[in-house]
Amino acid sequence: MTLVYPVQSLAAHPPRLSPAYKSTVKRSPSKPLIPMRHTLSELTGPVYGHETVREHDHDLTIQGKGEPIGERIIVHGHVLDEDGRGVPNALVELWQANACGRYVHVVDQHPAPLDPNFTGAGRAQTDAEGYYRFVTIKPGAYPWGNHHNAWRPAHIHFSVFGHAFVSRLVTQMYFPGDPLFPFDPIFNSVTDEKARNRMVSAFDLDNTKPDWALCYRFNIVLRGRNATPMENK
Amino acid sequence: MPQAKPDGVTPSQTVGPYFAYGLTPGGKYEWNDAFTNNLVTPDASGERIRVEGTVFDGDGVPVVDCMLEIWQADAQGRFSDPQDKRALPNSSFKGFGRIGTDAKGAYAFDTIKPGSLPDPDGKPQAPHIVLAVFARGMLLHLYSRIYFDGEAANAADPVLALVPAERRATLIATRQPGNGNAVYRFDIHLQGDKETVFFDV
């Protein structure tokens, strides 16, 4: 299978300079990016073995001595290419705040409790169909310093590797119906509504485990299409 | 279960300020590193080098919450990826590294100097490492390339040739004086007069 990575696919991404998100103002390039053809360096990417992901790395609720506080959830879905084919053996890394909206990172000092049984980091590898699954705690919203009374909608950070270095993706998964959506400059940096909605997980009743955990589905679509598409006859 | 054809890629979002405990814990958090800044494997042939530098924002202030990832060929110019259809490398060298900048915005990678490799027309590309830059305030990561000074092949490199001559130096790591393994300096300027060249790939 040979994939191509059209630059047109990048149009879904937010502009690097999005002044409503203030930190972008001094951290986005002022000169135009230089277009170039993809070479082997761009079209290949790291391959990692099963040693990278340990057996329980996908379950963030069993990393501590006891159970973390909060609403247990299942987050699952497929990593797909732009043709809708599953991306097998893709490394999916996840990090998030705890149920109170507090990160274990030393810089996060906002007045909400840490949970000794919750680190908030996880890792999974997709199976042959591109499927991944995590068990975690629903993260809380939290305040940040971008503007007066700024709050991030609850979200889970995702880092994903595809087939190529240019299909690398870091994104955030949001929860459906969050009342903070209209006020968040990071969420709204994605200007196209359809594209924005691709960052919002879907509540998944069919895979909700009775008496145990709600389930959310989050499919992640990476760059990459078949280089030789089927012809329509 | 077949999936519906997507209506586009999932948009990128910033790594934010708090990625370290998940992506670059480095012994400071109760989580293990999937990747580190040391790419060298005992069986890898080639010249051991260090690439180091500092990341700066548009005001020249060091960026202390930046994550860098590099991807490179081995000393023979081959990638540890079966998609590289040429003969596979004969070592366990993986060619991928990751590091978070420190409290001074500095980073370093220990690796081996990559070999040259062909471009899509079969013309040689000068030895280079591809670089991805992530940070709070960056909604979408940036791609650049690290070349090496003193390389005659730089003059004919087809990618460097796309870059205006006066900006090419931003892509060339400078050899530092000293004995022992070669150290190359590669500072990254996200914005401004000294702005590093970034590629639209």
Image (tube, coloured by chain):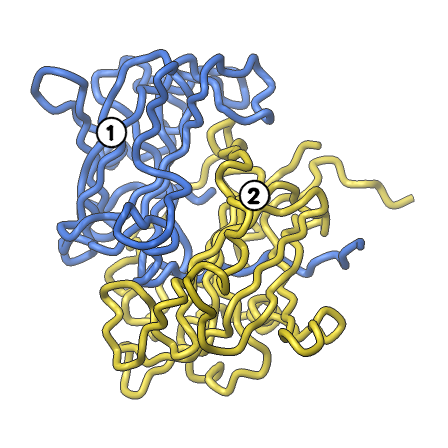
Chain colours: A yellow, B blue
Is residue B34 or residue B131 the one in the foreground? Answer: B34
**Residue displayed at 28% across by 71% down:** A22
Q: In this figure, which residue is indicated by the disc labeled 1?
A: B172
At label 1, counting other C-alpha atoms closer than 10 Å, the crowd grade (few under 14, some 14-19, many 20 or more) is many
Q: Residue placed farthest to the right in the image? A: A233
SS for tag 2? loop
Residue A205, given in percent of the width and then of the height, sits at 72, 76
Q: In this view, does A26 lie above or below A89?
A: below
Chain under disc 2: A
Side (left or right) of A178 relative to B97 = right
Residue A143 % position (x, y): 32, 81
Where does label 2 land, which residue?
A162
Is B157 in front, or is A54?
Answer: A54
Say which mark, if any, is on residue A130.
none
Specify whether B68 is left or right of A227.
Answer: left
Chain of the residue under label 1: B
Question: Crowding at label 2, few (<14), some or many (≥20) Cα neighbours within 10 Å?
Answer: many
Residue A188 visible (yes or no): no
The image shows residue A12, relative to residue A231, as above or below, that is below
**Up-down relation of residue B201 to residue A135 (above or below):** above
* Distance between the alpha carbons at the discs numbered 2 and 1: 28 Å
Instruction: Look at 56% across and 67% down and name the residue there.
Output: A199
The residue drawn where x is 51% and y is 44% is: A53
